[in-house]
Amino acid sequence: MARLEILKTYKIYIGGKFPRTESGRYYIAENAKGEKLANVCLSSRKDFRDAVGAARSASGDWGSRAAFNRGQILYRIAEMLEGRKAQFVDELQQQSVSKAAALKEVETSIDRLIYYAGWCDKFQQLYSAVNPVASSHFNFSVPEPTGVVSVIAPQNNSLLGLVSVIAPIIAGGNTCIVLGSYSKPLCVVTFAEVLNSSDVPGGVVNILTGKPEELAPYFADHMDVNAIVCCEKDAVLQKMIQEKASLNMKRVILYDSVNWQGEAGQSPYFIMDTQEIKTTWHPIENIGGAKAGY
Amino acid sequence: MAEKTIVIPSFSLPARIDQVGIEERAARFTKRSIKNETKLNGLLLTLNMIDLTTLEGKDTVGKVKQLCYKAVHLHDEYPGLPTVAAVCVYPSMVATAKKALGDSGVNVASVATAFPSGQAPRNVKISDVKYAVQQGADEIDMVISRGKFLEGEYNYVFDEIAAVKEACGEARLKVILETGELVTYDKVRRASDIAMYAGADFIKTSTGKISPAATMPVTLVMLEAIRDFYYKTGKMIGMKPAGGISKSKLALHYLVMLNETLGEEWMNNHWFRFGASSLANDVLMQLMKARTGVYQGKDYFSID
């Protein structure tokens, strides 16, 4: 007897769990030929609200972990992704990417995770400074995570783009809520499964699927979100985001013309985009005769 | 209902609570559809029913003053908000709270009787209560002797509550059963009956120091005890769930349960209180969300 194939339910990822959207809505993802691929959750603002709650409660622990430990976990994500390479290549192909391009996209994604895993405990030394001041203080500046970041991920390069925006954010100790590609959602959801099996604490990365134009206003005006990353090249959308983000002075980071495939798609500066520089004035005693430099 | 002659029943007869029934009934209160306007009114009522609480070893005069300021100025950005019902502190902080609250109309509640364990001789407990009352407490939150209760010494527990009630004078007495230590609903019901017949003005679930604290089923058992007591004696008793209620949605569920079990007469802060500290901020965030349309973050609300 012919076996009936079990189809996967593509769900969203909030706080380390895979719920369906609270709204009960879905849309049908299609490939370039218009063939039906899957029913995908059409997330609502309440899903986003729940995700922000999860990201906020995860942020204290994640941000205060040893940077080295964050590096280990990013490396672990890469390991898990490597193990499921074939599945991602297959899903990308279903979404009308050629086999060679799909393989390249998955491999670049894995390498990118390794790249940022390495940076986790190194970028701080590059961007920190001991500052010369004219008083008896030891004065130094160090980067600290911004907090909770909402992200509208690239529409194309649904895997590589997603990885390229998430990795620097979490490498720096932030937590995030990411809206994956609307038109190519398959590997967005599958990547959430990879995260779920990679020692990434629940809530550090939350992944939604749905319409950017519907959710972007909430991504921009939620008062408990500290920064927003937008990869859409849409001037109207960008203006709206900037206006709403001003409510609580969120950082607005626009990656609308980054080529994620090449070398330009990775840099420690991406980590610094969601970092705040904290400067500390530490009083020191003036010791007579010892010519302190600072 | 006119007051009737109160006949004290025998507490050794087992009270019988249908555990499955209570839990199912309590779960159903969470499924009511609440319209926007009702929700808004419910949130404002919730704020007005809160006993803003700080009961920590590290409490300082400054902390209590800050809490009292918050009790009156919940969120000045939102004009026309009610105050909370009371501020709940340890006896040593009553004078501070009384002075800080002034004539704002917010009561000072004080825990007493060797809170939270209640493991002290009766004369120590009574002088604890008298001290708090003398310092100006409007309400006294006492704990019952759970050890004695579990030993079956119901008369001891009864007499103790009655003695504390006498020591309270004008102050209203809330009796904390610490349901988390009583284990079964039958025992919760029995302790509720003992407290009410001994003279409690309020019965209260928990100290907040033991988990589980207030749950909906336990509160329902106590509300039904209050209802039965009212039918028997014509006397209204207040209810205060405390501990573990930190989200406004849950608070609204409690209000639904209160309304459907005891009715509208109980729907005010003379007869119902929430013992909570972080609930106020969540309610405020919901109110601000309703007003501005923007999801709120805790950074923009005062620390409690």
Image (spheres, coloured by chain):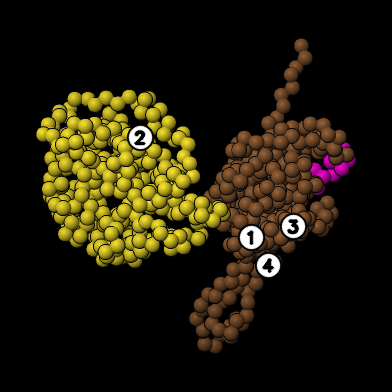
Q: Residue furthest top?
A: A1
| Front residue of this view, candidates A222 and B42 | B42
Q: Are marks 1 and 3 on the same chain?
A: yes
The chain to which mark 3 is attached is A
Indicate the quadrant where residue A24 lies: top right
Marks 3 and 2, how far apart at CA? 50 Å
| 4 vs 1, front mark | 1
Using the image, determine if residue A193 lies above or below residue A238: above
User: Which chain is assigned brown?
Assistant: A
Q: Is residue B301 left or right of residue A216?
A: left
Name the residue beneath numbered marker 1: A245
The residue indicated by pointer 4 is: A127
Packing grade of label 1 (10 A; few <14, some 14-19, many >=20) is many
Q: Which three-letter amino acid code belongs to the residue tagged 1?
A: Ala
Report, in whole angstroms, how far the alpha carbon at label 4 lies from the one at label 1. Answer: 26 Å
Q: Secondary structure at mark 3?
A: helix
